[in-house]
Image: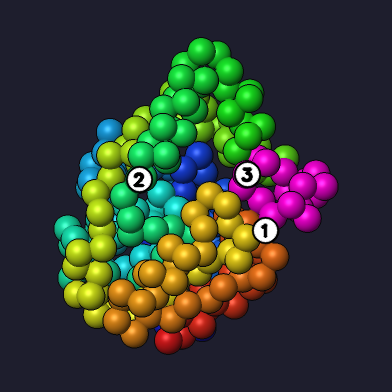
Amino acid sequence: MTSGEPVLLVPGMMCDAELWRDQIAALRGRACAIPVLDGETIETMADDVLGQAPERFALAGLSMGGYVALAIMRKAPGRVTRLLLAHTSARPDTAEQSAGRQAAIAAAGAGKFDRVVERLLGATVHPSRLADVLMLQRIEAMLRRIGPDRFVHQQRATASRPDSRPGLDAIAIPTRIIAGDTDRVVPPDNALELAAMVRDATLTMIDDCGHLSPIERPDRFNHALLDWIAG
């Protein structure tokens, strides 16, 4: 790995820095992991992340962390040297997605967070990994650390995010897009769109992978991560 700027790792919804455990090890002291995303909107989350960030940094965000990364590119593009967007989208929510979020918020508020956790686990990982007890325990522990209150805030922030597609063609730094071929949370056509709209972006599609490739397929993710850093 070449020497250079720190790598800021921004977690997704219901994730904390544990999402990046294998990547922090691979980056050998260069990682700067945001513990968890807080804020009422994606924009305020971006402001919070910028307040914690080094002056100049490579930026990697997954899922909701990707929404925040795109907001950072609008707010402070001169501070970002490289961009990695994993399992994310530049599109706003559809009406169907917004309705699903409202149902999840209602369930969490009605004391049914256990049911929310169960559904998230089932939707997040590739079906072949549902028997991987240790991996599921690792993911579930993150979900429970985040908890129902923060879950509601993150859902509302995500539901109100803007359309980030205008301006994507202005991104002129080395950009890597990573997706799972069977991601049911953010389907891979979103990655194809990002790769087409960001100039000179490189797309990595990870086979047999759901929504959390840093945990599900860390070797494949790390290969793409280090290649992006070496650039």
Is residue 187 something one can see in this rendering?
yes
* Amino acid found under the numbered disc labelled 2: Asp
**Residue bearing mark 1:** 216
Residue 8, by quadrant, is bottom left
The numbered mark, 3 or 2, whose residue comes first in the sequence reads: 2
Q: CA distance from mark 3 to mark 2?
A: 18 Å
Give residue 175's position: percent from left, percent from top. 37, 76
Of the two numbered discs 1 and 2 in the rendering, the one whose residue sits closer to the viewer: 2
Secondary structure type for disc 1: helix
Judged by its main secondary structure, the magenta piece is helix
Q: Nearer the viewer, residue 54 or 109?
A: 109
Where are the magenta residues, as a range? 121-136
Secondary structure type for disc 3: helix
Give residue 84's position: percent from left, percent from top. 41, 69
Q: Nearer the viewer, residue 102 or 155?
A: 102
Residue 123's label in the rendered image is 3
Residue 93, by quadrant, is top left
Give residue 95's position: percent from left, percent from top. 36, 39
Q: Residues within 10 Å of mark 2 (few under 14, many from 20)?
A: some
Q: Is residue 53 magenta?
A: no
User: In the picture provided, is 75 more to the left or to the right than 14?
Assistant: left
**Residue bearing mark 2:** 93
Of the two numbered discs 3 and 1 in the rendering, the one whose residue sits closer to the viewer: 3
